[in-house]
Amino acid sequence: MMNLNRTVLAVMATLICMVSAGQGLTKKQAEILVPRPALQPVKSLDPLNPDVMAMDTLDTSSPSRKIVLYTDNTWRYWVDGSVVGTDTTFTKHWNTNPDAYGLKFDDFPMSSYVWLMDSTDRYHFPGSIEPTKVSSRYGRRRGRYHRGTDLPMPRGSEVYATFDGKVRVAKYSSGYGNLVVLRHSNGLETFYGHLSQINVQQDQWVEAGQVVGLCGSTGRASGSHLHYEVRYLGYAIDPEWMIDLESQLLRQSVLVIRKSMLSPDSSYSPESDDEEESIAEADEAERLEEERKEAERKAAKYVTIKSGDTLSTIAKRNGTTVSALCRLNGITTKTILRVGRTLRVK
Ligand SMILES: [Zn+2]
């Protein structure tokens, strides 16, 4: 017994001498002596901050929420998707159809309160666009129903998860093109359509701000843009109720959804896929028309009527026609021209 202890002590002393001398150890021997974590730091769990090392994790009163401490002295709440993801929110009505609920409009609740944020939740704007630059808004236009908000962004630009959530759909879906649908703990769903690339997999847990895909124009889309939808129980609501597009921030911490705010048309229907492109095209045409009118307004030229002027002399002097003058000024050839009045000639 004594001998064995002495032998152990002797070996340890030798090893300690070798370590303090800092040489003569193979890598294998060094790993036995030095605990592994010291050699290979724990990699950050945070997909948003992969380069900053996580130092420690603290429990909270909720089994699914932890506090992660980082080596750069920052901390944040972290949601354990493997715990939250088993909640009935993520198991009932869980399939890969764009509408997983198939709820009749009559059965939609009269009003619902959806918590968007508390102090431990996080949020990220879905795209990276200039504030207020929106091409097509939500709602009924020209007899069609647009169920989302279109955010024009360059092809390949990153598209972000709005909140933490679980990937319900990550596939090509006719009109939507490459589509990602996330379901969030509060029951809301967010849709990200026309992606050029999908970066997540079905049933994966993602965090707010994580890149779910890259912007594109797959499916029925004219031009690269993100088609962003917010749905509750299968019915699309105007994303602008939730997000102020100018500041790109949430408007409030609780979203009140009244049935009266919804249209039966806002449920998913396969025909609605076809409407996306025509809405986008019509909106583009409207925008070009507005630009043309604006350019015309800018190029406008005015003259003051002098004594002896007639419409035809004014027209001749300004290289235009009498009928063009009448149209521009809302007058007829019988209108009396008062000296000093201003006429638009261009
Ligand atoms: Zn759209």
Image (cartoon, rainbow, N blue to C red):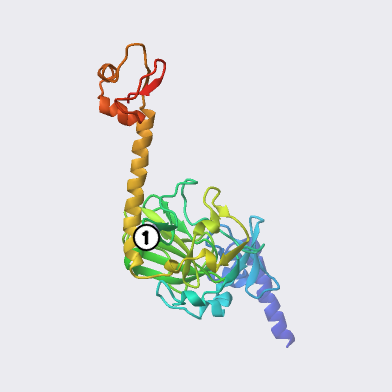
Looking at the image, residue 144 sits to the left or right of residue 4; the answer is left
| Quarter of the figure with residue 277 | bottom left
Secondary structure, mark 1, is strand
Q: Is residue 78 above or below residue 139?
A: below
Question: Cβ of disc 1 within 8 Å of ligand 1?
Answer: no
Query: Which residue does the numbered mark 1 point to in the structure image?
Result: 144
Residue in front for this viewpoint, 122 or 60: 122
Residue in front for this viewpoint, 86 or 304: 304
**Which amino acid type corresponds to the residue marked 1 in the rendered image?**
Arg
Residue 12, horizontal then vertical, whole percent: 67, 74
Bin the neighbour count of mark 1 within 10 Å (Cα to Cα): few under 14, some 14-19, many 20 and up: some
Residue in front for this viewpoint, 184 or 133: 133
Residue at point 33%, 30% (across, down): 328
**The C terminus is located in which quarter?**
top left
Residue 313, horizontal then vertical, whole percent: 27, 16
Residue at point 54%, 72% (across, down): 187
Split into quadrants, the picture shows ligand 1 in the one at bottom left
